[in-house]
Amino acid sequence: MTQIAERRELRDDGLSGLQLSTRLKNIWRTPSGFFGALMSVDHKVVGRRYIVTAFVFLLLGGILAIVMRVQLAGPEKTFLSADKYNQIFTMHGSTMMFLFAVPVMEAFAVYLVPLMVGTRNIAFPRLNAFSYWIFLFGGCFLWISFALNVGPDVGWFAYVPLSSLQYTPTKRPDVWAQMITFTEVAALAVAVEIIVTVFKQRAPGMTLDRIPLFVWAMLVTAFLVMFAMPSIMVASTSLILDRLVNTRFYDSSSGGHPLLWQHLFWFFGHPEVYIIFIPGTGMVSAILATFARRPVVGYPIVILSLIATGFLSFGLWVHHMFVTGLPQLGAGLFTASSMLIAVPSGLQIFCWLATLWDGRPVYRTPLLFVIGFIVIFVLGGLSGVMVASVPIDTQVHDTYFVVAHFHYVLIGGAVFPLIGAVYYWFPKITGRMLSESLGRWNFWLAFIGFNVAFFPMHILGLIGMPRRVYTYTADMDWAHLNLLSSGGSVIFALSFALLLVNVIHSLRSGALAGDNPWDASTLEWATPSPPPPQNFDRIPIVKHRDPLWFDNESLPVVAGLSVERREVLLTSLAEAEPQIREASPAPSIWPLLTAIATAIFFIGSIFTPWAVLWGTPPMAIALIGWFWPAKTREDEE
Amino acid sequence: MRTALVPFATLPLAACAGRQSVLDPQGLQSDQILRTFFIFLIVAAVVWIAVVIVLCVGMLRRKRAAGQPLALHQSFERTSGRVVFVLGVATLVIVLGLSIVSYAGQRTVFAKDENALTLKIIGHQWWWEVRYEDDSPNKSFVTANEIRIPIGQPVKVELESADVIHSFWIPSLTGKMDLITGQKNELQFTAKTPGVYRGQCAEFCGLQHAHMAFAVLALPPDEYVRWRDKENESAKSPTEPLGKQGEQLFRARGCALCHTVRGTLAGGQLGPDLTHVASRTTIAAGTLPMTTATLGAWIADPQHIKPGNTMPKMPLQSDELIAIIHYLEQLK
Ligand code: HEM
Ligand SMILES: [Cu+2]
């Protein structure tokens, strides 16, 4: 246990009830006012901003999707020019992948992981704030460029040599590549925070086998980010260098090779889809347990599957390159390794089915989305097994079949769980319930709209429609199915409009939630909704995997943390035994200033290499400000 | 499942059009791929239906919702653990089985024949240069955006790119293969039945990627030989005045800077070879059917029909345009 130091500092064992709560609140709260808000390092404030921002990008990306569907609804439509269409599908893909899907998952982790592991703030809270600002600036940079007609137009995987200076002499690919840099930095920062939070800040007693499945999922995701991002970093940096200072990484006429780009990109790009999907599985596990009224069957199997998925996801990038002229046997082996990932994914599905089978399900909106997830995702997974086959892929690669496939896995595997998660955690985050009847409408519109929009695309691909075409001729027999698909996507879009209505309406007049409206089992439900700045008045002690269900007494707690300054409890990695009390940083404006300096540096450098020089001093100054030794005492045991 | 049936009802229709469909195989390779595909499709359908049935039964078997979290029964946990394990092993067996099926199909699809007829295809933004190459010069010539091949004989295409990456795809005959800058790829296929098959670029290659198609005419062997011999000839110079004027304007107005017409002084290399342009079925890489009207529209303003393509709008008087079209129409 924590040792009592011989100081006369006030600890939480010296106070009780309301007094303790108020004191802690004052220490941990975000300063008031506009500037206070800019200084916030509270993981809940940052997480909330992150979530809202990511959803704004979902909305923007979704609007682009509808615009594309309007253009494709009939043959030879002139609603969009070729140039606009190409910018739009690139913006849609890049926004959805880099500014919505990955960040929104991280955002939920930033908000929920500290609560779920029973600590007061995320590890490295200032880095966390910095990460949000960088993400925000990167996203705005991309969208402002698009508004100025400098939106990227080379696809979300920006293949060279099309994206090279020779074939795209505008600034558009630079914008794309630098937006990647922004999101990389933001994602890596969050990954580090999550890993350290989970490893070192779990509540005492939360041993490795008592960590909630959602937290496990986010931990595995964080490791994927750590190992996948460097690859895209190398790729996009070399691209920028090729474009700006005439290096020749990808130039085949001087010894470079365009396939190098594809290898680097997909070594990142394939794990990327698991970076999106694995958090989805974590959400599914959390929701399923609560509404099936029992823990998920096979906790160790689910965790091992997550880890196996993580490892396998790095061994199959080549299946994106089956038609680049690879050696046949090598390609065949990547077929097998790609299909192998069906095993851990399958195991998880089986565990979830068993959970529903044994449970006594309560059909609330979050559970509906999980059921929709199973139906859709399994279909997407199976079409994934198809495209993993080399001969089949030579036909369907780069067609609408693949567009259908990856929307089934991305929307089925991540967006459905995510919307379920919104319904599930909204009460915790805002203190109010979302409307259940709107929720049902939302689900059915989404489920039907989604399938009507995307199922026909499988057939379109098979009857020869390539992806990324801005139009097609009337004699191609693609018109009916395209019209059907466009109709479906409007229904699908309506379901999101309904979600927005529900959120706005419930924020004002939703039913009050109380601490634990769903009678769920994990620690985030042990604190008020919305949680106070300090999260918990006293850090709980965990004795069970589902503490709120099976610890029949009220939660036991540890005592001994300071109530005069921000302190978190560090525990050991495996057994979560208390080790030391560590000071947690106070609000600060420096992360924002550093982010601004970094943004100037990044954006400047696409216009002149000299920005790398004159951009450095402001960044250095900001970092010095950030790391200026604070007056608070250092960590104590 | 009902959503699945509706689109399949439209399949026969697609088959009639028969131009560009994986589901309408007319080649040895596309046939094999479709067989592999159907095996996968059946397995996938069975698995998906099984999952949905288990899901539905699981949801329906206990109607009463529980308020309290359920007490766990050791026996259920143990059995379900075992069932999940067995299903995991079953999944493994299925995917290994499918991998083998896939590899067997792959071997057939990519089997090589040394005696194949060889052509070289070079991708350009946004058209296809087609070079028939043979040891004997009277079987070697250059054309564009249209390939004629004999049925029943393996054809080998060597794929290269003049600029960015493209992908060569004739769904009715075989799967696609990329044309990669600085790399040589090849693809073999054999057409079984005579017909016109449409192919299309499948790798995003810039502004007019959507308008980068081509036609494949699979012909009975004797017809193919007749076409080849004709294609090999140089263009015949027109004899009547309008044609002569057209030929002259073709050079004077700059067309010849980019286009070749064999047997004349026109020797440009930037655009498609036009020696026998009038015998082709489409213009502008499958963008429009070949007719007098479309030819005229194209030459009058190529940027209107295919914005951003490399061919500029040439300043032509309408009588000049008529003469040029008249000339081109004789290039059969
Ligand atoms: C309203 C919902 C959506 C609709 C109607 C939709 C529609 C489309 C369409 C039609 C394309 C193909 C564009 C083309 O090939 O020309 C496309 C591409 C894409 N979509 Fe979506 N989409 C939706 C949501 C999403 C979501 C939620 C994600 C990711 C989480 C996503 C990720 C992508 C990606 C990565 C591409 C590829 C872009 C590229 O080719 O560079 N989409 N989408
Ligand atoms: Cu192309």
Image (spheres, coloured by chain):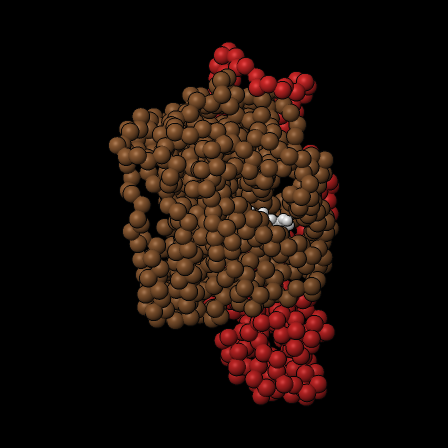
Chain colours: A brown, B red
Could you tell me residue A181's position as x and y percent?
A: 42, 57
> Is residue A211 or residue B136 the one in the foreground?
A211
Question: On the picture, is A174 further left or further right than A486?
Answer: left
What residue lies at 32% left-to-right and 68% top-to-bottom?
A613
What residue lies at 58% left-to-right and 22% top-to-bottom?
A293
> Is residue B36 or residue A364 the one in the foreground?
A364
Question: On the picture, is B84 further left or further right than B53?
Answer: left
What residue lies at 62% left-to-right and 74% top-to-bottom?
B303
**Quadrant of the image occupied by residue B44:** top right
What residue lies at 58% left-to-right and 45% top-to-bottom?
A407
Above or below, B146 relative to A546? below
Could you tell me residue A265's position as x and y percent?
A: 42, 52
Could you tell me residue B275's position as x and y percent?
A: 57, 74
* Quadrant of image for the N terminus of chain A: top left
Could you tell me residue A391's position as x and y percent?
A: 51, 43
Question: On the picture, is A108 further left or further right than A419?
Answer: left
